[in-house]
Image (spheres, grey):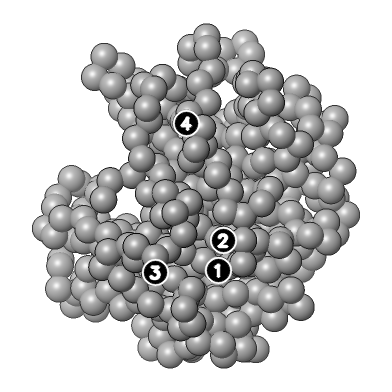
């Protein structure tokens, strides 16, 4: 099955760098890149200098507001600097960005629901990569991130004062902890539950020493050695529970615990990527999983990509070779959409955002698309989305 492709070949934004397309955001590991509130879809991506750019699409008037560059700070060609976007309970937009093993940057909109002016906030944490943010039902802001490099624990900080201050770090998963392989690590995606009282967490195991661990497929870029799929849920009461219902009491949990209680899919020696997450109105997650053995860093294909689908809709987690026909229609459509869901609003969220490399006549561009599963793509007239002064 192929993802939904744009019915109208026109982008609302593009970013250019000389010589190669520039990836404007991460699909799952930095999230969200779009948030829906007050009938507006706010979006965030980075420009060719790694600086955060914010747009807004009024879904009632069908007009675009922006783009606006929210900060002059950027990591240049390092895509890890991409922005995560959240809205606090007073309507101020927050952008978390510019971090790759160093301090996370944070800016906030001066006026609620207005992207025109931004103010610098204190760094939420001094060392981080991959910010993922969300507002919960009680108004608190959750900020997930990896606490530095590959081997560091994935961590949560909470703000209960609209981003003015943050709790102490709460490490959740550290695969190498008390484990014989000190190079075991993971990559995570966190998404809010249907009522914004729970959190769903998914991750893959990353082998940071594939040669030393004598993996079947050798000689590829270190980034591609990612395996299996794990799951945990944070309940409305604040308790983390693994996939089989086991409480995660001794945090951060390690690979031994994850393999025994949290694993929902064993990929063997094939590489794993989580391509799409859909949360339905009953707070049940559905997944589209990519398998194969491909060095996407070097363009090498050993086992072509193929897709599997997973959900605990009927009780325990089950992985399917084909999407079950009895799954809800909108869920099936969303699982095949091109990019990750926007946060905010009712679940499942029909809005999604993604990027793709430009057409042959514009080979150095990366285009960004904002789509709705029923209404199609929101097209912004007027060409590429730069920032004022660019």
Residue at image point 63% right, 48% down:
343
Q: Which residue is mark 4?
A: 376
Q: Is residue 16 above or below residue 111?
A: above
Residue at image point 88% right, 54% down:
161
Crowd band around label 3 with a 10 angstrom C-alpha radius: few (<14), some (14–19), many (20+): many
Measuring from the top left, give residue 296's x and y in whole percent: 24, 49
Cβ atoms at labels 2 and 4 below 8 Å apart = no
Crowd band around label 2 with a 10 angstrom C-alpha radius: few (<14), some (14–19), many (20+): some
Label 2: which secondary element: loop
The disc label shown at residue 280, or none: 2
Looking at marks 1 and 4 on the same chain, the residue that comes earlier in the sequence is marked by 1
Cβ atoms at labels 1 and 4 below 8 Å apart = no
Measuring from the top left, give residue 197's x and y in whole percent: 73, 66
Q: Is residue 341 above or below residue 316?
A: above
The disc label shown at residue 57, or none: none
The disc label shown at residue 284, or none: 1
Label 1: which secondary element: loop
Label 4: which secondary element: strand
Distance from Cα at disc 2 to Cα at disc 1: 5 Å
Quarter of the image where one finds residue 91: top right
Label 3: which secondary element: strand
Q: Is residue 87 above or below residue 291?
A: above
Looking at marks 3 and 1 on the same chain, the residue that comes earlier in the sequence is marked by 1
């Amino acid at each position: 099955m192929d993802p939904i492709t744009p019915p109208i070949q026109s982008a609302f934004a593009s970013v250019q760098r000389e010589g190669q397309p520039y990836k404007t955001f991460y699909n799952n590991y930095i999230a969200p890149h779009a948030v829906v509130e007050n009938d507006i879809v706010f979006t965030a991506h980075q420009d060719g200098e790694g600086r955060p750019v914010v747009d807004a699409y009024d879904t009632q008037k069908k007009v675009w507001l922006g783009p606006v560059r929210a900060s002059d700070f950027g990591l240049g060609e390092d895509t890890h600097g991409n922005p995560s976007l959240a809205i606090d309970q007073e309507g101020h937009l927050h952008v978390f960005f510019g971090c790759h093993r160093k301090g996370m940057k944070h800016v906030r909109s001066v006026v609620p629901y207005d992207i025109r002016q931004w103010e610098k906030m204190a760094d939420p944490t001094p060392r981080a990569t991959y910010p993922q943010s969300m507002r919960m039902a009680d108004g608190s802001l959750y900020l997930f991130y990896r606490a530095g490099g590959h081997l560091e624990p994935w961590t949560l900080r909470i703000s209960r004062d609209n981003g003015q201050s943050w709790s102490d770090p709460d490490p959740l998963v550290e695969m190498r902890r008390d484990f014989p392989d000190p190079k075991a690590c993971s990559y995570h995606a966190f998404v809010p539950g249907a009522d914004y009282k729970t959190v769903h967490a998914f991750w893959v195991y990353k082998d940071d020493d594939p040669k030393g661990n004598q993996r079947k497929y050798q000689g590829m870029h270190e980034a591609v050695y990612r395996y299996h799929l794990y799951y945990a849920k944070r309940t409305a009461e604040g308790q983390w529970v693994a996939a089989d219902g086991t409480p995660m009491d001794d945090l951060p949990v390690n690979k031994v615990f994850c393999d025994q209680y949290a694993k929902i899919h064993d990929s063997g020696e094939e590489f794993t990527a989580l391509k799409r997450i859909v949360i339905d109105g009953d707070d049940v997650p559905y997944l589209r999983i990519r398998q194969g053995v491909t060095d996407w860093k070097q363009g090498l294909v050993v086992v072509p990509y193929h897709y599997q689908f997973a959900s605990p809709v009927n009780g325990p987690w089950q992985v399917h070779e084909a999407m079950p026909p009895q799954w809800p229609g909108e869920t099936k459509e969303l699982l095949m959409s091109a990019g990750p869901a926007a946060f905010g609003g009712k679940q499942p969220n029909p809005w999604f955002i993604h990027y793709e490399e430009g057409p042959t006549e514009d080979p150095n561009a990366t285009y960004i698309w904002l789509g709705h599963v029923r209404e199609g793509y929101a097209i912004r007239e007027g060409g590429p989305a730069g920032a004022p002064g660019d």
